[in-house]
Amino acid sequence: MLDKIILYAVWVFTATLLLIFIKKKDLIKAQISFLFMQVPSWLFGALVVEGGLIEYPVGLLKMVYKASFTFEFFVFPAVSAIFNVHFPREKSKFIKVLYTLSFPTFITVIEVLLEKHTELVKYLNWTWYWSFITVTLTLLLSYAYYLWFFNKIKNLYKQN
């Protein structure tokens, strides 16, 4: 029962973060980031579950989806939207690296705590550093897509 309460609280917390950090002027950028991240998140989530690396004993839609619906379709896309919209493009490399590593660090710490104290995630043949690496690389992939997409849009408007 506590695991389900945590799961619902995560939905509320994530929605609140979106409301706080995504302003009206950034809504389109956030939506593109959110929707893009659902694809690699779903793919990697399905691969680790089907590969017997991680399991999610408690979750939403467990009858139809073995991986973490909450993380892959809502939490991680929301984090990606916030990450991309607020990326410190004009700051030093040090700040960019610090910013980039802070997101996967936070996510990994939360995941490890959930793995140790709940039935929401269980590492089978997985460790925290694989989560850190995959979250980092996936966020960077999302940011690269974000830059590419909005550069293409900007160039289309310049041509017209």
Image: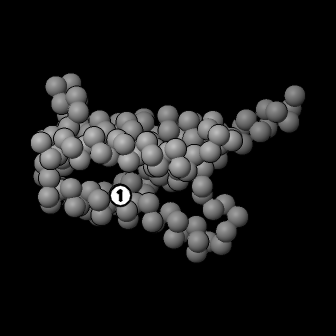
Q: Is residue 70 visible?
A: yes
Q: Is residue 41 left or right of residue 62?
A: right
Which quarter of the figure is the C terminus placed in? top right
Q: In the rendered image, is residue 126 in sight?
A: no
- Residue at (31%, 39%) from the top-left corner? 70
Mark 1 residue element: helix
Residue under label 1:
107
Residue 101 coordinates in the image, percent (x, y): 46, 66
**6 and 136: which one is in front?**
6
> How many residues crowd mark 1 within 10 Å: few (<14), some (14–19), many (20+)?
some
Residue flagged by tag 1: what amino acid is it? Ile
* Residue 121, position as x, y percentages in the image: 18, 49
Q: Quadrant of residue 128?
A: bottom left
Does residue 33 appear to the left or right of 76 in the view shown? right
Q: Position of residue 81 (x, y in %)?
A: 52, 45
Q: Is residue 145 left or right of residue 132?
A: right
